[in-house]
C-alpha cells in the first residue's frame, strides 16, 4: 500500500510544473523604480498564476497583484476565478471575477477600503469599506494573465488579432495580439488617449511575460519592466 501511495505522489509531482520570473521596473531618468514577480504552478489540468508589482515607496506608494485560477483543456488555459488587487496609498481595491462558462457570464465583486475623510481635508485611521457587484454579460474567456498564456492558441496562425480580456485596469482599451519574427506581443492602447500612450508586452516561449514597455510621452521617459 505504501508503495502505491509513493508511486502516486511521485507521478503527481512529475506532472506538476512551476515557473518563477522576476522583473526590474525602471525609467531612463530615474533608474530602478520597483520590482515585480510572476509565479505559476500547474498540474496536468489545473493551473494557478500570480503576478505582484511593488513600486518604490519613495516615488509612488503603489502595489498591484493579479491572480488567475482555473483548468487546462486541449492546451488552453480557462480561468474560473481572477483576482485583481490595487493599493494606492491607503486606498485598496480588490475585484473578484467569477467565470460562468456555461451561461457565458462573469460575476464581478469589488471591495474598496479607504481611510475615512474628515471635513474633506483630513483622513483618519478608520477604514470605510464599500462593496459592489456587477454582472458582465459581454463574456470573454480570458483574463489579463491567461491572455499571455493563450497567445499562441488565440492567434491560431494569424499574425494579428483583437482580443478581449477582463482585469486590465481600464475597460476603455484596445487590445491587440501580434506574432512577428517568431515572437508574441500584446499591445494595449487607451481609446481616449493619444498615440503617445501604449503598453507593449513581449511574451516568452513559456507563456510568461518577457518584458513590458509602457510608452508615454513624458520628460522622464518610458517605463520598462525587464525579466531577470
Image (spheres, rainbow, N blue to C red):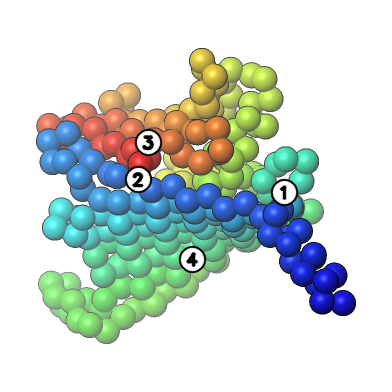
Q: Mark 3 near mark 1, Cβ–Cβ under 8 Å?
A: no
Find the distance from the CA under tag 1 to the CA under tag 4: 26 Å
Work out which residue is located at the far top of the displayed protein and give it.
181
Mark 3: give few (<14), some (14-19) or many (20+) Cα within 10 Å. many
Circle nearer the N terminus (2, 3): 2
Residue 110: give its label. 4
Q: Is residue 75 visible?
A: yes
Find the distance from the CA under tag 4 to the CA under tag 2: 28 Å
Find the distance from the CA under tag 2 to the CA under tag 3: 10 Å
Q: Nearer the viewer, mark 3 or mark 4?
A: 3
Q: Mark 1 near mark 4, Cβ–Cβ under 8 Å?
A: no
Circle nearer the N terminus (3, 1): 1
Work out which residue is located at the far front of the displayed protein and give it.
3
Circle nearer the N terminus (4, 2): 2
Q: Nearer the viewer, mark 1 or mark 4?
A: 1
Q: How many marks?
A: 4
Circle 2 — which element? strand
**Residue placed under numbered mark 2 in the picture:** 23
Circle nearer the N terminus (3, 4): 4
Q: Nearer the viewer, mark 2 or mark 1?
A: 2
Locate the C terminus by quadrant: top left
**Residue placed under numbered mark 1 in the picture:** 72
Find the distance from the CA under tag 3 to the CA under tag 4: 27 Å
Circle 1 — which element? strand
Residue drawn at the location 25% of the way across and 50% of the way down: 34
Amino acid at each position: 500500500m505504501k508503495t502505491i501511495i509513493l508511486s502516486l505522489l511521485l507521478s503527481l509531482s512529475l506532472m506538476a510544473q512551476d515557473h518563477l520570473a522576476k522583473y526590474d521596473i525602471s525609467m531612463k531618468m530615474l533608474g530602478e523604480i520597483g520590482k515585480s514577480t510572476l509565479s505559476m504552478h500547474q498540474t496536468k489540468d489545473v493551473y494557478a498564476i500570480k503576478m505582484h508589482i511593488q513600486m518604490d515607496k519613495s516615488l509612488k506608494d503603489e502595489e498591484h497583484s493579479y491572480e488567475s485560477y482555473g483548468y487546462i483543456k486541449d492546451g488552453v488555459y480557462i480561468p474560473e476565478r481572477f483576482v485583481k488587487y490595487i493599493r494606492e496609498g491607503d486606498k485598496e481595491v480588490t475585484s473578484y471575477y467569477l467565470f460562468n462558462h456555461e451561461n457565458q457570464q462573469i460575476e464581478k465583486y469589488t471591495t474598496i477600503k479607504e481611510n475615512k475623510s474628515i471635513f474633506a481635508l483630513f483622513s483618519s485611521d478608520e477604514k470605510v469599506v464599500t462593496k459592489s457587484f456587477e454582472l458582465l454579460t459581454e463574456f470573454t474567456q480570458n483574463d489579463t494573465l491567461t491572455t499571455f498564456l493563450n497567445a499562441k492558441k488565440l492567434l491560431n496562425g494569424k499574425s494579428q488579432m483583437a482580443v478581449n480580456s477582463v482585469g486590465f485596469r481600464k475597460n476603455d482599451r484596445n487590445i491587440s495580439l501580434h506574432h512577428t519574427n517568431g515572437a508574441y506581443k500584446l499591445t494595449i492602447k487607451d481609446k481616449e488617449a493619444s498615440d503617445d500612450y501604449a503598453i507593449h508586452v513581449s511574451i516568452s516561449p513559456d507563456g510568461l511575460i518577457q518584458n513590458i514597455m509602457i510608452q508615454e510621452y513624458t520628460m522622464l521617459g518610458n517605463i520598462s519592466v525587464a525579466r531577470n
